Structures are given as C-alpha cells and as structure tokens.
Amino acid sequence: MLSNIIGLVSGCVTFLGGFLIVWGALSLGLAIREQQGGAQIASAISTIAGGAIIIAAAIYFGQLDTSWLPA
C-alpha cells in the first residue's frame, strides 16, 4: 500500500514539475518576444530550473525502497 501511495505522489509531483517547465518556457518566450527587461527573463529561467529540480526530486522519491515493510 505504501508503494502505491509513493507512486501516486511521485506521479503528481512529476506532473507539477512538468507544468512549471512548460509555464516557464511560455513565460520565457513571451518575455523575449515582447523584449521585456532582464527580470522577466530571469524569472522565467528560474521557473524552468525549479520545475526540473521538482521532477528530479519526484523521481528520487519514487525510487524509495519499501521492501522493509511486511507483506
């Protein structure tokens, strides 16, 4: 049961990280298109990086060992 919960949480967090990457890419494209200042571009890049970190954490969380649990 714990492995099912870990899998579900990992999938949801991975989806959230992917959403942040897409949102950051859209923000970056709009900031470049409208030639806004460096703050908008930096914010979009940090959103993309944050999404990638969240996905990496979700993958690591999904690989937790639950074999010590009784069957």
Image (spheres, rainbow, N blue to C red):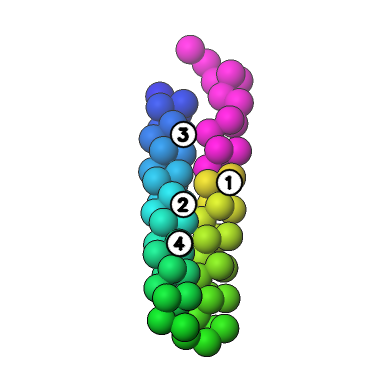
Q: Secondary structure at mark 3?
A: helix
Which kind of residue does numbered mark 4 sit on? Ala
Is the Cβ of the residue at disc 1 closer than 8 Å to that at disc 2?
yes
Which of pointers 3 and 4 lies earlier in the amino acid sequence? 3
Label 3 crowd (10 A; few <14 / some 14-19 / many >=20): some
Which of pointers 1 and 3 lies earlier in the amino acid sequence? 3
Residue beneath label 3, please? 6
Residue 64 painted magenta: yes
| Number of numbered labels in the structure image | 4
Q: Secondary structure at mark 4?
A: helix
Q: Position of residue 34 (x, y in %)?
A: 41, 81
Q: Is residue 2 left or right of residue 45?
A: left
Image depth: mark 3 or mark 2 in front: 2
Which kind of residue does numbered mark 3 sit on? Ile
Is the Cβ of the residue at disc 4 closer than 8 Å to that at disc 1?
no
**Residue found at the far top of this picture:** 71
Which residue shows up at 40% across the image and 46% down it?
15
Which of pointers 2 and 4 lies earlier in the amino acid sequence? 2
Residue 57 numbered mark, or none? 1
Vertical arrangement, residue 6 with respect to residue 70, above or below: below
Which residue shows up at 46% across the image and 52% down it?
17
Which kind of residue does numbered mark 1 sit on? Ala
